[in-house]
Image: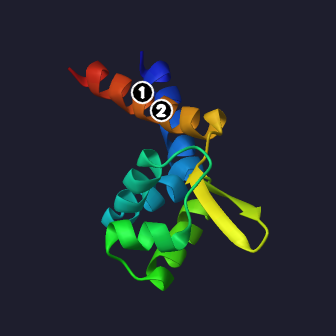
Amino acid sequence: MEKECQKRIEEITSGFKECQNAFTAIGDQTRQLILLVLLQSDLSGIRVGEIAEKTHLTRPSVSHHLQILKEAGIVNMREEGTKNYYYISADESRWKKIVDLINLVYEGVLHIK
């Protein structure tokens, strides 16, 4: 039992390190607002100006937060001529790592009961 618990703790520790950027990115209220806008846009993406309009943020602020979300693998961008379109990443492996980590923590909590 102790060995199983220690293994879970090691997996959680590793998962925290691996998902740290994603948690930091989605933990910010402004970025959460941007993600909600992206989730409501169509799959072809949305431009910074449109995001700024819908969130009542400045374009530079939106660009800054989108960069953080991109670096965390949460958001992707596609170029169309001189225009950039942003959308939620469909990289299932990235999202699966986050879900698996949350499930590991949850299992640990259940184990404590």
Q: Is residue 10 visible?
A: no
Quarter of the figure with residue 57: bottom left
Picture layout, residue 56 above or below residue 5: below
Question: Which residue corresponds to the image point at 55% horizontal and 37% vertical from the top-left?
Answer: 95
Discs 2/1, front: 2
Residue type (three-letter) at the residue carrying disc 2:
Val
Residue 103: x and y, percent? 42, 27
Q: Nearer the viewer, residue 16 or 78?
A: 78
**Which residue corresponds to mark 2?**
99
User: In the rendered image, which quarter contains the N terminus?
Assistant: top left
User: In the rendered image, which quarter contains the C terminus?
Assistant: top left
Q: Is residue 86 visible?
A: yes
Question: Which residue corresponds to the image point at 36% horizontal and 66% vertical from the top-left?
Answer: 54
**Which residue corresponds to mark 1?**
103
Residue 80: x and y, percent? 76, 63
Picture layout, residue 31 above or below residue 36: below
Q: Nearer the viewer, residue 55 or 29?
A: 55
Q: Nearer the viewer, residue 62 or 25?
A: 62
Q: Nearer the viewer, residue 107 or 22?
A: 22
Question: Which residue corresponds to the image point at 52% horizontal and 77% vertical from the top-left?
Answer: 64
Residue 24: x and y, percent? 45, 61
Helix, strand or loop at label 2? It is helix
Q: How is the image coloured?
A: rainbow
Furthest residue in direction top, as rendered: 1
Question: Which residue corresponds to the image point at 79% horizontal and 69% vertical from the top-left?
Answer: 81
Marks 2/1: CA–CA distance: 6 Å
Residues marked 2 and 1 touching at CB (< 8 Å): yes
Residue type (three-letter) at the residue carrying disc 1:
Asn
Query: Taking 100 as reference, is 106 left or right?
Result: left
Picture layout, residue 12 above or below residue 40: above
Residue 4: x and y, percent? 48, 20
